[in-house]
Image (cartoon, rainbow, N blue to C red):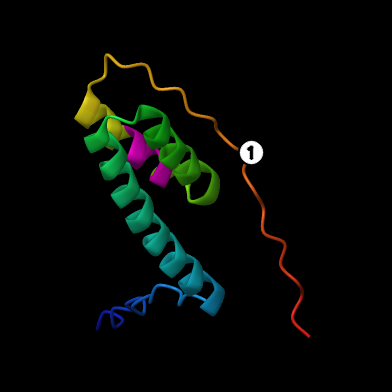
Amino acid sequence: MLAPPAVTAPALRPPTKTLREKGADSFHAALAAVLAAGLEDALEEGDHQRAISFINRGFAEGTPQMGCDLLCRAMEAVGAARTWTVQLAPRTEVRQRPAP
């Protein structure tokens, strides 16, 4: 008696991103580059208020991860002994219109 042929699951492709998602990724990459450059300048000048402003913008206009990355960079440059006060903005939800 022959064994039934082995059935393999088809290879799953990751879902493709929508144009909106691709645009958001591009925007966040550009925003991260601008904020990181501004943060570096502020840290080099010792302008902690300006550095905090860049960190806050990372949280508010970017993503939580972006804000955390900027905050960690500031802590590496200045040291964890400095107290960093950042303002967390409420999470925004993008309303999507139904397709026509």
Mark 1 element type: loop
Quadrant for the N terminus, please.
bottom left
Magenta-colored stretch includes residue 70: yes
Considering depth in this image, is 6 or 37 the residue closer to the camera? 37
Q: Which residue is more in the foreground, 38 or 87? A: 38
Q: Position of residue 67 (x, y in %)?
A: 42, 41
Q: Label 1 is placed on what type of residue?
A: Pro
Q: Which quarter of the rendering shows the C terminus?
A: bottom right
At 55% across and 73% down in the image, what residue appears?
20
**Camera-nearest residue between 62 and 44:** 44
Residue 46 position (above or below residue 25):
above
Number of numbered discs on residues: 1
Q: Which residues are magenta?
A: 66-71
Image quadrant in which you'd find residue 88 = top right
Q: Position of residue 27 (x, y in %)?
A: 46, 65
The chief SS type of the magenta part is helix
Indicate the position of residue 98 as horizontal and vertical percent values.
77, 75
Residue shown at 67% from the left, 59% from the top: 94
- Residue 51 image point, x, y percent: 37, 35
The residue where tag 1 is placed is: 90
Residue at 54% x, 30% y is: 87
Mark 1 nearby-residue class (10 Å; few <14, some 14–19, many ≥20): few
Q: Nearer the viewer, residue 4 or 18?
A: 18
Q: Furthest-top residue in view? A: 81
Q: Which of the 4 quarters of the picture holds residue 60?
A: top right
